[in-house]
Image (cartoon, helix red, strand yellow):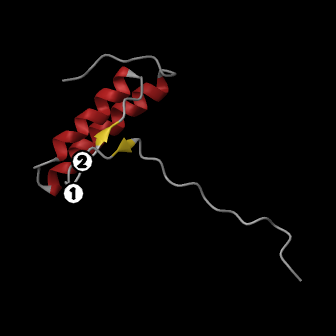
């Protein structure tokens, strides 16, 4: 007997990032696509701070990004004032 349930193939994860490497160049950093929301775009851009920082300092950058994104969600998507 066959399983009557349709096969489920999860959609590919979308990161919002597109490759930006010139032809023939590998290992180049990805460039984030703008979201259209100024605060979210600012938060995504802030993740560039991770490059060159020791891994033990990444947590603070991620926590800051997470806090800002939570603020955007809590405000119903209204742009929030940038933080220093």
- Lower sequence index among marks 2 and 1: 2
- Tell me the quadrant of the picture where the C terminus can be found: top left
Above/below status of 58 relative to 80: below
Which residue is at the far right?
Answer: 1
Q: Residue at x 31, y 37 (%)?
A: 65
Give percent across and percent down for residue 10.
Answer: 60, 59
User: Within the image, what quadrant is residue 69 found in?
Assistant: top left
Residue at label 1? Answer: 26
Q: With 49 as the anchor, is 65 left or right in this view?
A: right
Secondary element under disc 1, as helix, strand or loop, is loop
Would you place residue 51 above or below residue 39 in this image?
below
Tag 2: Cα neighbours inside 10 Å, few (<14), some, or many (≥20)? Answer: few
> Where is mark 2, residue-wise?
21
The quadrant in which the N terminus is found is bottom right
Disc marking residue 58: none
Number of dots carrying numbers: 2
Q: Secondary structure at mark 2?
A: loop
Q: Tell which residue pokes out farthest to the bottom in this image.
A: 1
Image coordinates of residue 28 in percent, x first then y, are: 20, 51
Picture residue at 34% right of the left edge, 34% below the top: 67
Q: Quadrant of residue 47?
A: top left
| 42 lies left or right of 76 | left
Q: Is residue 12 left or right of residue 21?
A: right
Q: Position of residue 72 (x, y in %)?
A: 43, 26
Q: Residue at x 47, y 47 (%)?
A: 14
Q: Residue furthest front?
A: 23
- Left or right side of 84 for 14: right
Quick one: label 1, few (<14), some, or many (20+) residues within 10 Å?
A: few
The residue at 26%/33% (across/down) is 45
Measure how far apart labels 2 and 1 are at the Cα level: 6 Å
Asked if disc 2 and disc 1 are in contact, CB closer than 8 Å, the reply is yes
């Amino acid at each position: 007997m066959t399983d009557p349930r349709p096969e489920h193939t999860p959609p590919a994860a979308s990161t919002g990032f597109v490759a930006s490497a010139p032809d023939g160049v590998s290992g180049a950093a990805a460039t984030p696509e703008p979201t259209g929301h100024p605060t979210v775009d600012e938060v995504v851009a802030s993740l560039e701070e991770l490059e060159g920082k020791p891994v033990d300092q990444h947590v603070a950058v991620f926590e800051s990004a997470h806090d800002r994104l939570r603020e955007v969600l809590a405000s119903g998507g209204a742009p929030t004032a940038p933080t220093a």
